[in-house]
Image (tube, rainbow, N blue to C red):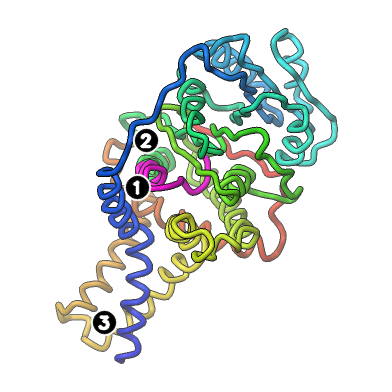
Amino acid sequence: METLKILFWILLFIIFYTYVGYGMVLYVMVKIKRFFSTKRSINTIEELPEVSLLIPAYNEKDYVFQKMKNTQNLNYPKDKLNIVWVTDGSNDGTHSLLENYENVQLFHKDERKGKINAMNRVMPHIKTPIVIFSDANTNLGEDSIMHIVNCFNDEKVGCVSGEKRIVNKDSDAAAGAGEGLYWRYESTLKKWDAELYSAVGAAGELFAIRTALYNEVEQDTLLDDFIISLRVAQKGYTIQYNPEAYAIETASANVKEELKRKIRISAGGIQSVIRLRSLLNIFKYGLLSFQYISHRVLRWTITPLSLLLLIPVSAGLAFNEGLNNFQFYTVFFWLQIAMYLSALLGWLLENNATRIKVLFVPYYFFIMNLSVVLGFFRFMNNTQSVNWERAKRAA
């Protein structure tokens, strides 16, 4: 029984550290660093560099007008903003619509080989010092490009990640409420990560790199934004996070669509951990490795397994104490049961809009960890295609 107790505390520590403890440690480290912080310099309008906004798109004709209108309204000198679309494989007329715009550099091939292959094909044609990647179905904040460029005023910065914002309504179904709450917490961690040293990865909806730092990525890569940004960090540059540069999109249409998206991300996460395994060497990468392991690796590997194992372990300890006794392990076991029942309640209320969004947190947390398990098997079975199907978004 003592062995079971030791295992219980190890599992509980892993789970607590992954989702709460790291944030607490990070906050303390950031507070300490702030005593030694210096203000960043800001570019003036004369210093602004020419940039390319690269938009990979597959069958996005419904978003072309909206994206182009948003792009044309961005607060950045028009003569320094190159708009580049790559629409490889699209057969819904996306590229035909874009041909009507004079200020667009369009790359199109009928063959579909996935997003990363399209990006690899176009990047040699990008001649500006900074390239900004953005999804076709997101709207950027008016000053987003300016905020991103300002970050590059620091020569140590090799990549800048913008913030992904989920459209927030007073009432949301499970997918919208859960995803929105999750991204607000994630944004806080990313901001602290960047302030301490470097963010750990970039949001594909909006991120930028120094063009010269781009290296062709493997053709079967599932998380291109993550791999591209971390490989920049491996070269000794930092990934900065600027929440004032943001991309707005609606939440997944429902939890089924969100699960589909997260399974793909989880499969890609496991692939990334394998491909970036050198980053696990804390003696070589120091603080970056600490942040990477704490913020990413644990979530994609042992923490979901710890959650699974904690159920039978705590059940064994509770049965040993007696299920009717209000001792620690028994109370903890019943709290676990209550959490999973709350997740079940979230499932029952999945498509009902409600203002009490906290009801969907356990359900979204459950879905998030379930997706890692399913993503692991999908990766091991090699059934996750690089030509992934985009999750349907809410209206």
Q: Reading the chain from its start, which is encountered first: label 1 or label 3?
A: 3
Image mark for residue 360: 1
Q: Reading the chain from its start, which is encountered first: label 2 or label 1?
A: 2
Q: In percent of the image, x 66 and y 18: which residue is there?
A: 83
> How far is the residue under mark 1 from the one under mark 3?
27 Å
Residue receiving disc 3: 318
Q: Amino acid under label 3?
A: Ala
200 part of magenta stretch: yes
Q: Quadrant of residue 257?
A: top right
> How far is the residue under mark 2 from the one under mark 1?
9 Å
Q: In percent of the image, x 38 and y 61: which residue is there?
A: 18
Q: Is residue 181 visible?
A: no
Q: Amino acid under label 1?
A: Phe
State the SS at label 3: helix
Q: Residue furthest right?
A: 110
Residue receiving disc 2: 172
Q: Reading the chain from its start, which is encountered first: label 3 or label 2?
A: 2
